Amino acid sequence: MVGKNYEERFEGLADKIFKNAKADELEVRISHNDSALTRYANSKIHQNIARNNFNLAIRAVFGKKIGSATTNALDEDAALNCLTRAENIARNQRKDPDFKSLPDVKGLKDKKDIYIDKTADHSPDQKAEKVKEIIEMANEKGVDRVYGAFKTESSGLFVANSHGVEGFSRLTSSNITTCAIADWDNDQGFGWGEMCSADVSDIDHLHVAKTAVEKGLNNLDPKKIKPGEYDVILEPLAAKDILIYLDMMGFSAKSVQEERSFMNGKFGDKIMDERINIYDDVSDADMIGFPFDYEGVPKQRVDIIKEGVANKVVYDSYTAGREKDKESTGHALAMPNPMGPLAMNLLMDTGDYPLEDMIQETEKGILVTRFNYCNPVHPVKGILTGLTRDGTWLVENGELKHPLKNLRFTQNLIDAFNNIESIGKERKLYSMGYWPAYFVSPALKISDFRFTGTTEF
Amino acid sequence: MRDLVVFGIERLEKENVAYGDVRLCERKSEVINVKNGAVEAIKSSESRGYGIRIFDEGMGFASSADMSKKGMKETIKRALKIAKASSKVSVKVDLEEIDIHEDKYTTPYKIDPFEVGLEEKLDYLMDVDERMDIDERIKVRQCNFKAWKTFKEFASTEGARIEQDLIMTGGGLGVNVSDGKDTQKRSYPNSFGGDYNSKGFEFFKSFDLIEYAEKTAKEGVDLLDAKQCPKGKKDLILDTNQLILQVHESCGHPTELDRALGTEASYAGTSFLTPDKLGELRYGSDIVNIVSDATAEGGLGTFGYDDEGVKAKKVDLVKDGMFVGYQASREGAAKIGVEPSGNMRADGWQNLPLVRMTNINLEPGDWSRDEIIEETQDGILLNGIKSWSIDDKRLNFQFGTEVGYIVENGEVTELIKNPTYTGITPEFWSNCDAIAGEEDWKLHGVPNCGKGEPPQTMQVGHGCAPARFVDIRVGVGKW
């Protein structure tokens, strides 16, 4: 858990650092993360862990020379040693002509936490009980092998700089996944369920497990289908997998400035179906995230794709400083960061179609639960490849005809988002997993989605 | 061995756990990125802490950065509580027996990368950057240096007491080019940050980035006007800096025993190499030999002992084309009756050790790279990792490289862009008909292999020489 006294503790340490600093500008960032994760496989808990760590990061600036250092030791000696390292690096640095200044934004203290005590305090016993219920429920339905993970975490972020920026915020997050394998011996019957919330009380572990088990049981004896262009129905999780890569390939100012975004030269142009609205907004009721970024700038809502038009991208202070009359939108990662800014609270507007109606109105198409191992083939063209996973079905005449062996797609995503047939009316929150980024996505029906290969399961 | 580690082991022994270990790590790193004539980032990082792993009625792991004895006691208490919770839904774990060691290991190196001055490194990288500035179509020039130093102490309730000092060093350069219509990239000695090894600063200098800066930049620009990769079936020659990815994804991951036993099913996936296929499945042609070798000199996956105290070793994974071995933990080894392979590795002090690659190497063959090209009538030669994707059993893969070259009638004739190829793992390796020999064999490092929940990043090595695969589908997708 992130202690209630942490703000005071971090402020006290930052004060000592600021008092000893020689740099013209200085940024102090202190973060804390306490997480617990119970993994289960073959219907047994096999990995069960807890981690607790702090991180102190100091960015020192002399003129236009910048140095950074980090440590996870929060005693005064270690903190001052970290300061010395950052300042020494900065002194020996080269000038960065594009660097303007550390941010100068006040008023962060009014921002609220998304912190649920029940999530932060959730015990290993409570997790084990829920895993046990998942296994029992799956067994009752005849599935004796379930896999997954149940994670809770609490995080705190303190940022202060020599211009008077100062903020502290806490958040919690919980996430559960279940993968059912209904026929292990014959390597088939894969199904998936997943749920994420700031409040662990919202996690309906049995609903997640039921979804996975039912999908697994409906995914026996999958058949091969010839690769080609098909109408595809992406469940919200599969749509999220696509959304992540649109974000990575094109939604940051840095990717535009380096001319590696599919948005380059297209601002103001309609590049997707007019029903597509994609935006970053940490204040959305469904979203999890700190209200300010890693350099202390409040996160603004940024309408990235508005009614299909390439509208805006997200900025940190550095990328904003490289353009005329631009300000940071509050999307800095921990600096310095070669990736640049990133939209970490990305949402896509819903439409008016229940998933069931999408299926019913499909003459011939493919229903996808989620994707595996996607990777850009050509970011500027927006071409992505990846495979279906944990439940793919052929839809014919409005019904699920039979499960399909997994398929590889290689698809231009901009083309795909121009071929939108319908958008789901429900949306779901997902954690990215690798980074503390969150995505809210509806289901999507897309025509002429290009599958380029099949696999054996 | 530090008092804190000894204190931790004594507490675990007092708790009478069936098995426990304490693993303390201190790591420092230095990163320098230069981009377009400016230093994009210089960062010095330090992290230290310890992890407590317990196997009793259930398993528990807790980690902490609190280096006091009080912190150690609380962390052990937390790990015990977790192990007790696990016991509600688990079976008792058997660990395969191993030799117990008291030992010290240090990475051999010539020049400590942390003793080389920042000024010298910056001067070098800025010089490299300037030499890449040869054409206005080059939108991004970047070069970088990175080094890690890790000190580890491992002690177990079985009596192991191991200390290790490990060093890793590397870097590289690259350009992104654009003419407003197309964008391409080119890197050296490999993409995604370059190449890495368990060696000192001498390894970084051996790349001779100064020499390769202009050449790499020029090839990046040339790609803009290059022809699109042809579609269809071709003989495929992979240079070492792409073949390592092929080995990593299609042999390294599927021979991880935890995947084969299902314990990564909900995240990274499983494996087509299930235990019933051990010794039975033809993985590739009979010239294909692949090993897991933590003893390879200078490899990014080279060390003295793994993170459960198993001494570094070399293990056959594929022998004469047959699937013959796994990368196995003590727990996994006990389940299927094999020896632990010394592949348990944790990302830092805070994470649980998992089955991870060490150096997964394709053994050299008896051709030369030149001979392979001379004996190819209708092929393409690919170089430089660009895009990769593979299914969760590691069968269907599709990879893209930075550059390709047409090979016609024994000669390299033309540069091509956006090359991609796809295949099914055992079919692909069965089509391997030529592997170059020792003189073309290189040991590369991949510093960013992801696995596990919570996600862990591992530094792994891959050695190989260029190889040819016949009749492979290339030029996938609509361009």
Image: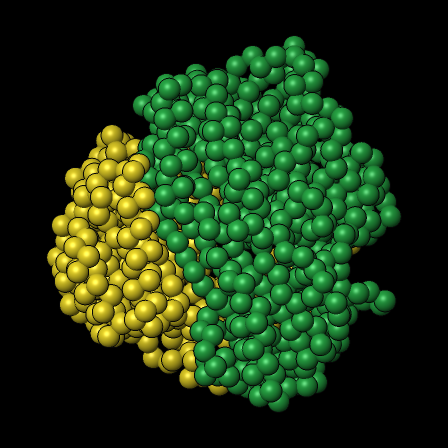
Instruction: Answer yes or no: is residue B30 visible.
Output: no
Residue drawn at x 85%, y 67% is: A325
The answer to which of A149 and B396 lies nearer the viewer is A149
Residue B21, x across and y down, in percent: 24, 59
In the picture, residue B132 is in which quadrant?
Answer: bottom right
Left or right of A400? Residue B439 is left
Asked whether residue B21 appears in the rendered view, the answer is yes
| Residue depicted at 63% across the width and 29% down the height | A234
Q: What count of labels does the image hold?
A: 0
Residue at the top extreme, as displayed: A397
Figure check: B156 above or below B278: below
Q: Nearer the viewer, residue A114 or B183?
A: A114
Q: Nearer the viewer, residue A236 or B293?
A: A236
Which tint was used for chain A? green
Expressed as whole percent of the image width and height from the top left, the position of residue B193 reads 52, 63
Q: Is residue A150 left or right of residue A427?
A: left
Residue A248 rendering spot, x and y as whole percentages: 64, 50
Dividing the picture into quarters, in which one does residue A360 lie? top right
- The image quadrant where one finds the N terminus of chain B is bottom left
The residue lying at 32 percent from left, 44 percent from top is B85
What percent of the width, then of the height, locates residue B333?
Answer: 21, 43
- Which chain: yellow? B
Q: Residue at x 69, y 18 (%)?
A: A357
